[in-house]
Image: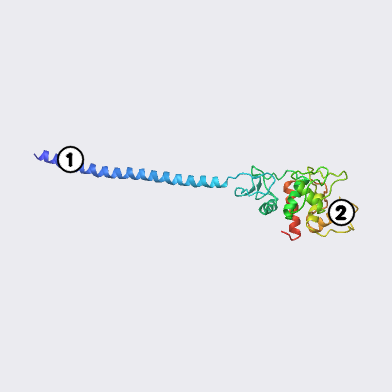
Amino acid sequence: MSDKKFDIKHLSFMGLLLLVSGIAVYGIVNSSISLGNYTKEVSASVIGAGDSVSATGSTTGSATGSASATTAPVGLIFSDVPVNHETATAISYFKQMGYIGGYEDGSFKPSNLVSRAEFLRILTEMVQADFAGGVYEKCFKDVNSEWFAVYACYASQKKWASGYDDGTFKPAQAVERVEALRMAFVALELKIPTSVDGQPFVDVPVSSWYAPYAKLAKDLGVVNGKVFLPSLKLTRASTVQLLYDVLNRTGKL
């Protein structure tokens, strides 16, 4: 009898121990499951936030050559113009003012050459030209009613730009530094020196037609150094920088 009674008590104690152990194990397992679910929820939340930032950062380009409302990712002015680009300040300012735009892919193509027609488009935007009431077409042999006619003919009427001896304007020809400066100086109504006593640059003869413009460029600090390089063909980046420097040096920013 004593042995049987001992067995019953022993079994009751073991059952209680197993019951308690089972509760503890269930709690641990349940906690692990809950923690695992919480970890998954947090991970999903973080990934979702990351995806949201990426979606916000992605952009599409604007119409080629026109002023653009395209927002470049942080650290970029255009997709190919980072904020540490050598002409970043000028490009950023001209973009914000609506003087320039990017291409459909969001790029600016800063190394592309600028044509005479494109330069006048930027210049007329910069001076906020008023085209109202004018007829701007057929002002040169090679300028009829194309997209650039309004810019070329307006500039011709305002005496900013002139054609060549053969009566053409050559709108597709790359604009040169001396041409760009002359057009900008005249458009901004700056006072051009009437005479030049000495060579402003070693490559600018005193007798050259562009000597007064070269001298003004030197006096303003727009072009520095010993050479002027009048025939230097301007890129999109150097065009914007040149015009920005003219505005900055004349207090017109």
Disc 1 secondary structure class: helix
- Total numbered badges shown on the rendered structure: 2
- Residue at image position (78%, 51%) is 154
Judging by the rendered image, the residue that carries numbered circle 1 is: 11
- Quadrant hosting residue 144: top right
Which quarter of the rendering shows the N terminus? top left
Residue 33 visible in the current orientation: yes
Amino acid carrying label 2: it is Ala
Which quarter of the rendering shows the C terminus? bottom right
Decide: is 144 above or below 197: above
Instruction: Give the foreground label among 2 and 1.
Output: 2
- Residue at image position (76%, 48%) is 150
Label 2 CA crowd tier, 10 Å (few <14, some 14–19, many 20+): many
The way the protein has been coloured in the rendering is: rainbow
- Of residues 194 and 29, the one nearer the viewer is 194
- Quadrant hosting residue 17: top left
Disc 2 secondary structure class: helix
The residue most toward the bottom is: 251
Is residue 102 rendered to the left or right of residue 149? left
Q: Position of residue 134 (x, y in %)?
A: 77, 52
Judging by the rendered image, the residue that carries numbered circle 2 is: 211
Label 1 CA crowd tier, 10 Å (few <14, some 14–19, many 20+): few
- Residue at image position (33%, 42%) is 29
- Residue at image position (55%, 47%) is 56
Decide: is 193 above or below 60: below
Is residue 102 rendered to the left or right of residue 34? right
3D distance between C-alphas at marks 2 and 1: 114 Å
- Of residues 10 and 240, the one nearer the viewer is 240
Tell me which numbered mark, 2 or 1, is placed earlier along the sequence: 1
The residue most toward the left is: 1
- Quadrant hosting residue 184: bottom right
